[in-house]
Amino acid sequence: MNKFKKILVPIDGSEHSLLAAEYGASLARACGSEMILLHVIPDPGASFLFPPNKDGETSEQLVRKHRKQLKKIIEKIQNQLSAYNVILKTMIFTGDPAFEICRIAELSDVDLIVLGSRGLSEIKEYFLGSVSMRVVRRARRPVLVVR
């Protein structure tokens, strides 16, 4: 019996999320599982996540820029994972990353969440707690944190 039919891997382009994606792909190949790459764009309404930068860009402008960069991140990860020859789906949502990861894990009925131990925003993590730790606490699905 295949215990992991669907594996959810949240990605943000950080080195840790790339490692988690490779680990998830390795597991998916070994188990014959489907793998879902999930990227959550932080909600622009949370202005402290996207404060105006030195160029005066608003949170909405920063989210648009983020979406453009996201295409490159996803292509890079898909190319990196092509050697694993797994069924790969990609999802993009906007909201609180930890909440959305847990929500999508439930809605997609995944058997495992594989995520990196650190993401792109260490300052935000200092104040809010890391996304990975919040997912570990909230998720109703097994979580594997990759270092």
Image (cartoon, rainbow, N blue to C red):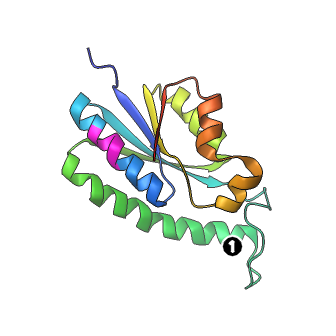
* Place of residue 36 in the rendered image (x, y in percent of width and height, measured from the top left): 40, 41
* Residue 133 appears in the figure: yes
Q: Is residue 25 magenta?
A: yes
Q: Label 1 belongs to which residue?
A: 61
Q: Is residue 61 magenta?
A: no
* Place of residue 43 in the rendered image (x, y in percent of width and height, measured from the top left): 70, 54
Q: Quick check: 82 left or right of 44? A: left
Amino acid on which disc 1 is placed: Gln
- Which residue occupies the extreme bottom position in the image? 55
Q: Quick check: 122 left or right of 107? A: right
The majority secondary structure of the magenta stretch comes to: helix
The residue depicted at 41 percent of the width and 59 percent of the height is: 74
* Place of residue 19 in the rendered image (x, y in percent of width and height, measured from the top left): 39, 52
The residue depicted at 38 percent of the width and 48 percent of the height is: 21
* Place of residue 26 in the rendered image (x, y in percent of width and height, measured from the top left): 27, 41
- Disc 1 is placed on an element classified as helix
The residue depicted at 76 percent of the width and 73 percent of the height is: 58
- Which residue occupies the extreme top position in the image? 1
* Residue 88 appears in the figure: no
The residue range painted magenta reads: 22-26
Q: Measured along the vertical axis of the image, is residue 16 above or below residue 30?
A: below
The residue depicted at 28 percent of the width and 19 percent of the height is: 2
